[in-house]
Image: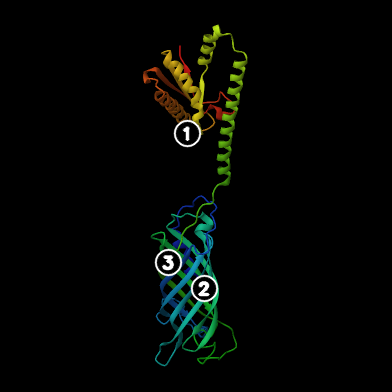
Amino acid sequence: MKKLLIVLALASVSVASFAQEPTQKYSVATNSFWSNWFVQVGAQWNAFYSGEEHGSGLSTAPWKSFRGKPEVGIAIGKWFTPGIGLRLKADGIWGKTVIFNENGKGKSFKYINLQFQPILNLSNLICGYNENRVYNLSVFAGGGMGRNFSNNSYFMGLSAGILNQFYVSKRVAINLELGWNRLENDFDGFATGTDEPGGSRGWDSHDNYLYAEIGLTYNIGKTGWSKTPDVDAINAQHQMAIDALNGKLRDAQAENDRLRNMLANQKPAETVPQSVKDLIATPVSVFFNLNKIDIASQKDLVNVRALAKFAKENDRDLLVTGYADSATGTPEHNQELSENRAKTVAGELVKMGIPESKIKTVGKGGVETLSPISFNRRATVQVTE
């Protein structure tokens, strides 16, 4: 028996060598009860070890013909997390003892063995969940009971093994399963020490069988696991949007204060042209959201429209200068972003009736000239001399 267990362990190590590279771990959201169910069907080759053979000197090799029988395995189960699942497995039909009759052949019987088996998906537990992983290695162990139909008796048992799954699609996987069942000593209809049911020769042992199974898994309903939203990243985005709005509000308040101060200190009528000239010479700002080239608020175009009217009536040229904040993005990206923001505002000037030949655009890239940094996500318009 020790040799058989060593063979089983070596087989698991060799198959595990096909595992893929570890992936980055992350949390997954809990799915509903009806998600991630599966059914399995497979064909087995079993090697039976009877409690009656202890001390008989029989070969323990699982491939000996006097031990082997074909069987069928069927299971239904559910994954509760990417690493933890549970299944109910039934296998059996044709059992075999290693007690020889007068013709030198082992005795056969019919049975079914039901086992509840918790499953651990080692690939997901150790390497992290990866929805594109082709190979998964799992281990299982459990307990249950069964019935020997030929002897009209019931038995209890334990089970353990490894499950190798090779996914050919999101729903279908090819299984290679190696397992061990340890059952009560009258599982095969014969108690230890005699060929008759109920006998005993005074020492305890159990009936066992090893199996190798190849089959298919089919996943039912919703499959896979969704990544848990990154709350910190979402909150950071919301905070950036709030900062941008606060920046625009402060700009508007500053502009109102400036206009209020100009009205309070307005010069006599004869000097108004010089005041208008001073006002027109002041750049007008148009603001943008983070990494955007669309104007954040159409209200910013009110002053731009007044400036455009003055330039058109006085045949003056306009300079549009685009900026990005230096706190985000690469220098190359910020340069392109600032140029595109300038082009956006130039396009609005064209809609206001300014010829393209009268408009010059410049991109200054990422800057940190204003505080807070969100104020730098803008484009300015001014009349050139």
Is residue 142 among what the camera can see? yes
Q: Secondary structure at mark 2?
A: helix
> Can you tell which quarter of the image residue 184 is in?
bottom right
Secondary structure beneath label 3 = strand
Q: Which mark is residue 292?
A: 1
At horizontal 43% and vertical 91% (from top left) the residue drawn is 101
Q: Quick one: 351 or 44, which is closer to the camera?
A: 351
Name the mark on residue 217: 3
Q: Nearer the viewer, residue 16 or 27?
A: 27
Q: Nearer the viewer, mark 2 or mark 3?
A: 3
Which numbered tag is attached to residue 212? none
Q: Which badge, 3 or 1, comes first in the chain's sequence?
A: 3
Of discs 1 and 2, which sits in the foreground?
Answer: 1
* Residue depicted at 51% across the width and 21% down the height: 284
List the residue tagged with mark 2.
2
Amino acid at dot 2? Lys
Q: Separation of disc 2 and disc 3 at Cα?
A: 31 Å
Residue 195 drawn at (x, y percent):
50, 91
Q: Amino acid at mark 3?
A: Thr
Instruction: Return the residue nearer the eye: 64 or 266.
Output: 266
The numbered mark, 1 or 2, whose residue comes first in the sequence reads 2
